[in-house]
């Protein structure tokens, strides 16, 4: 079980795509338990709102190439799309935070474990391997 201390791990200016036609500028902050996007004053005056995503609810994380900067897509009930210069760094931090609360020993949390294709033992309660990022199919 991870303890949340709300320590900032990553912070950078970013663009959040509210929809395909609307985007908001602001600051993206990753803490040890949340991903927060604070909308800039100008965009908030037009009614744009920030988002806060609890890392425990994240189902998937993807990074896709963009024209200028890559996009990080975080799935947590819906897709949240962020564009920022240091997208790879954010993606790596999110993978560590969301999917690596296990150690390399088998069944460390006392529950059943799965041996991933990369050879690491991962608790069955996780959707992704924290070492290689492979998605586990739950049947």
Image (cartoon, rainbow, N blue to C red):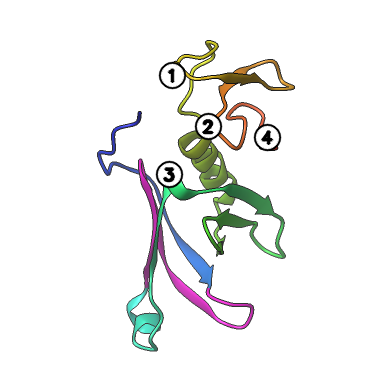
Query: Which one is in front, 116 or 138?
Result: 138
Question: Circle 1 sits in a helix, a strand or a loop, which is it?
Answer: loop
Q: Which residue ends up furthest to the bottom in the rendered image?
A: 46
Q: Hey, which quadrant is residue 56 in on the image?
A: top left
Q: Are marks 3 and 4 in contact (CB under 8 Å)?
A: no
As drawn, 48 above or below 8? below
Q: Which residue ends up furthest to the left in the rendered image?
A: 5
Q: Hey, which quadrant is residue 131 in on the image?
A: top right
Q: Are marks 3 and 1 in contact (CB under 8 Å)?
A: no
Give the number of the mark in front: 2 or 3: 2
Q: Are marks 2 and 1 in contact (CB under 8 Å)?
A: yes
As drawn, 132 above or below 71? above
| Magenta residue span | 18-39
Q: Position of residue 115 (x, y in %)?
A: 67, 18
Q: Residues within 10 Å of mark 2 (few under 14, many from 20)?
A: few
Q: What's the distance in space between the residues labelled 3 and 1, CA to CA? A: 17 Å
Q: Are marks 2 and 3 in contact (CB under 8 Å)?
A: no
- Magenta part, dominant SS: strand
Question: Circle 2 sits in a helix, a strand or a loop, which is it?
Answer: loop
């Amino acid at each position: 079980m991870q303890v949340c201390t709300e320590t900032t791990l990553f912070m950078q200016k970013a663009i959040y795509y509210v929809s395909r036609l609307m985007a908001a500028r602001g600051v993206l902050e990753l803490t040890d338990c949340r991903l927060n996007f604070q909308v800039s004053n100008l965009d908030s005056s037009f009614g744009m709102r920030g988002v806060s995503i609890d890392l425990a609810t994240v189902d998937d994380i993807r990074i896709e190439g963009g024209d200028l900067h890559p996009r990080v897509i975080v799935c947590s009930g819906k897709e949240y799309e962020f564009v920022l210069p240091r997208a790879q760094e954010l993606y790596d931090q999110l993978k560590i935070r969301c999917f690596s609360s296990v150690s390399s020993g088998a069944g460390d949390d006392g529950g059943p474990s799965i041996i991933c294709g990369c050879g690491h033992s991962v608790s069955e309660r996780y959707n992704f391997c924290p070492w290689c990022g492979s998605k586990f199919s739950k049947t």
